[in-house]
Image: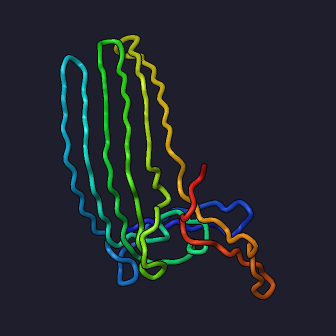
Amino acid sequence: TDQVIDYLDDFLGVETRRWIMSDKNIPLLKSSQFSIGSTYKIQGLLIDVSLFHKKVKGALISGQGFQNQIQDKRIAGTQNSLGVEFLLNKQTKKFDFWLSYTLSKNELLFKQISDNPFPSNNDFRNSATIGFNYHFNKRINTSISGIIKSAGPFTNIIKGQETTKNGNTFVVNYDLLNNERLK
């Protein structure tokens, strides 16, 4: 099976996610992943560092969440992820604290669209998470956490040629896929 995202063609743009069976038009997802890491633990302190590389073949572009010129296409391609993760975790009887950081690069390649890879919608190069749990007793605890990410990619509209008329409808002229990043 594979997940497909469809957007309703109304002013709300609500997305519908559904699972479909693999066949000759919808390839079976094949994934390979390599990771290597090291963990150090002493007196409730855990330090973990991991390097990873993941490649997915048969990824559908309709499962990536695009809302531009390719949102209705059913094209298969590859997705590559490469990165490093760092985790610091401190535990005591009364609290847990963690801090994590990920540096990664996530790219898509769909040969029917482009010969070059482009950033995936979840290509947030830097991501940091911080969290804290406090244990009042064995049955009651509270938690707070936060995450901050670097800006994600997006597909811009061609300046000066924003739309073209196709019969009675206007079509948006998009630039290269995910070629820009939010500030």
Name the residue rendered at 35%, 80% in the picture. 23
Q: In which quarter of the image is residue 41?
A: top left
**Toward the viewer: 181 or 42?**
181
Q: Give how far across and how far down residue 35 sits, in percent.
A: 22, 51
**Toward the viewer: 140 or 39?**
39
In this view, 170 is above or below 99 = below
In this view, 118 is above or below 141 = below
Q: Quadrant of residue 69?
A: bottom right
Residue 181 shown left or right of residue 129 in the figure: right
Name the residue rendered at 40%, 21% in the picture. 133
Q: Residue furthest front?
A: 160
Q: Quadrant of the N terminus?
A: bottom left
Q: Which residue lies furthest to the right in this view?
A: 168
Q: Quadrant of residue 29?
A: bottom left
Q: Give how far across and how far down residue 180 sits, in percent.
A: 57, 60
Q: Give how far across and how far down residue 70 sits, in percent.
A: 56, 74
Q: Give how far across and how far down residue 54 sits, in percent.
A: 29, 59
Name the residue rendered at 77%, 78% in the picture. 170
Name the residue rendered at 52%, 77% in the picture. 73
**Toward the viewer: 17 or 78?**
78
Colour setup of the view: rainbow
Query: Could you tell me how many numbered marks the image carries?
Result: 0
